[in-house]
Image (spheres, coloured by chain):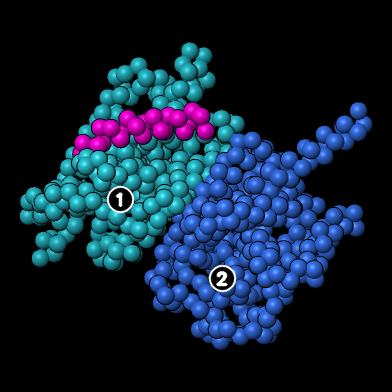
Amino acid sequence: MLTAVIIPTVINGLLMGAVYALVALGLTLIYGVLHIINFAHGALLSAALFAAFLCFRYLGLDPYVSVFGLAPLFFLLGYGLQRFVIGPAAHGKDSNILLVTLGLAVIIENALLYVFRADTRTIEVPYAFNVVEFAGSFLAVPRVVGFFAAFGVAAALWAILSLTDIGKAIRAVAKEKIGAQLAGIDVGHVYAVTFGLGTACLAVAACLLIPSYYVNPHVGDAFVLVAFTIVVLGGMGSVPGALLGGLFVGVVESLCGFYLGESLGQIGIFLMFILVLLFRPTGMFGERA
Amino acid sequence: MNSRKILPLVIPVAALAVVPVFVHSNVVLNFMVIALLIALVGQGWNILGGYGGQYSFGHAAFFGTGAYATAILQVRYGVNAWPAFAIGIAAGALVGAVIGFLSFRSGLRGSYFALVTLAFAEVLRILASVAPITGAGVGTLIKLDLRPISFQFQSRAAFYWVILALFALSLLIVRVIENSRFGARLVAVRENEDAARALGVDALSVKLWAMTISAAITAAGGCFYAQYFLFLDAGIAYGPWISVEALLAPIIGGLGTAFGPLLGALAVKLLGELAKFVTGDAPGLDLVLYGVVLVLVVWLAPGGVAGLMSRISSRKTRAAHG
């Protein structure tokens, strides 16, 4: 009886965790290279969810189709933000980056609030309530798609980082910024590409989420603290850490929600977050700062 | 502390104190009360962030604790508003000391510190939105009783003088800190913590005291909020809006200056009113403007309004001498 409830709870947690991992992947990538915490991450996710919503409502594009347009678009958005706003505004000081990304978060979130009001919206795709059976539990198709797509994106990201020239440049800048600069790498460009990749992850996450989720101007907030938790837990800047951390947090949230109820399920995440920050700020996979 | 250091504080406060004598418009007074409230909350942030260099993104934790303590003591336990106000400040300071102890002892700095303060404020917000003692989703209502003994006043002017007095007190505290050994140590920690420690500064205790004082001042703002609006819910008391306003005011006004939070609060609130006037009462637009101003100030005017003013005045003196 107990396992009959626990197993589906855990599996659903894993499915949700994969999408969390995708959001966290963007955050950890940006942190790993630029060494900044992007406080605008949640607001950008809200923006991506609205973009996917609008594509469906006004262009009739299924989110699984529009993702191929939105991901490049958000890459450009992220590239532009870092290259033309965050970079110049920060004057190279970490504390300034903190404030600039916070300012961007406030701008994006409230611009969405102004345009779309606080209403919560959903889209109706024909497959929203389809289920597949696995290990005795019924799983929503969009969640299953999200799970596998998230791993696909992680693999693609890994391929970009390890096989392409720009990937090598990104890793070089992450390791040794000045050395990379001396070797002729355009650090400003690499920073912006990294920020773009992180933002593109959000667009993918948004398209995977929207069929089974909802959108309102503050929806990103819930995800971003979860993503922070994952990134801290998995080690700042660690890609495998983000994946495992995401799955773990998804399961914890699912179990906490099951035992404590929805609103307290989130408390479990925050408490875990605070505990990890206080006692193991380098995470499970991170290196000593 | 001598009169030369106190006088520059007295003149602006005295000028502000006579405002209600000439202005009777409730709209203007209400505007000034809110601006001074944000200035007070921002002054709390300024002590930790401006003088100590520790950027908190969760000052709502102290604001909300002060506000809820004041309200709940009155509503649930029948405590008089004045002692409730004092206990509210103490409760906020205590929360500040606990969060500060936990995070500074673990060596959290920079963005990690910002993150953990944000998380603490969010935990408190979620707890307050489900705990029965805060009225959960319904919120807490303080009974209307317009008598000074209940810390409620018939006239806006009285509220105005109360918040002005609180802000003046915070100015005095900042000025005392600026001229004390503690202040020198605090600034040393901001400029280079490792170097300060090498010189024998106990960085942990300095930051902890700064956080406690900072939290107490911000909590006083929360207590005042409760008495002025007589209503609280989790989103008001612990919501991110107050954390943002708390840091916006000193950063826009001038980080680490005594009058920065007041200049910043006035600038921000004027801008908000202007936006409302131009576009009508649209939700979100004033905050969009605040965000734009925050980015622009960090980008173009790192010293804030105070920095701009001193730059202009030094240019004038140079022009006069040259």
What are the residue bounds of the magenta stretch? Answer: A63-85
Residue B67, label in figure: 2
Chain depicted in cyan: A
State the CA–CA distance, disc 1 to disc 2. 33 Å
Point out residue A43 in the picture as x, y percentages from the top left corner: 41, 46
Whether residue A226 appears in this view of the structure is: no
Q: Assign a secondary structure to mark 1.
A: helix
Whether residue A77 is in magenta: the answer is yes
* Residue occupying the point 69% across, 74% down: B156
| Up/down of A287 relative to A143, above or below | above
Mark 1, other Cα within 10 Å: few <14 / some 14–19 / many ≥20: many
Residue A211 visible:
yes
Name the side, left or right, on which B58 lies relative to A166: right
Residue in front for this viewpoint, B27 or B202: B27
Please give the residue where the numbered disc 1 appears in the rendered image. Answer: A249
Q: Look at chain B in the picture and name its colour.
A: blue
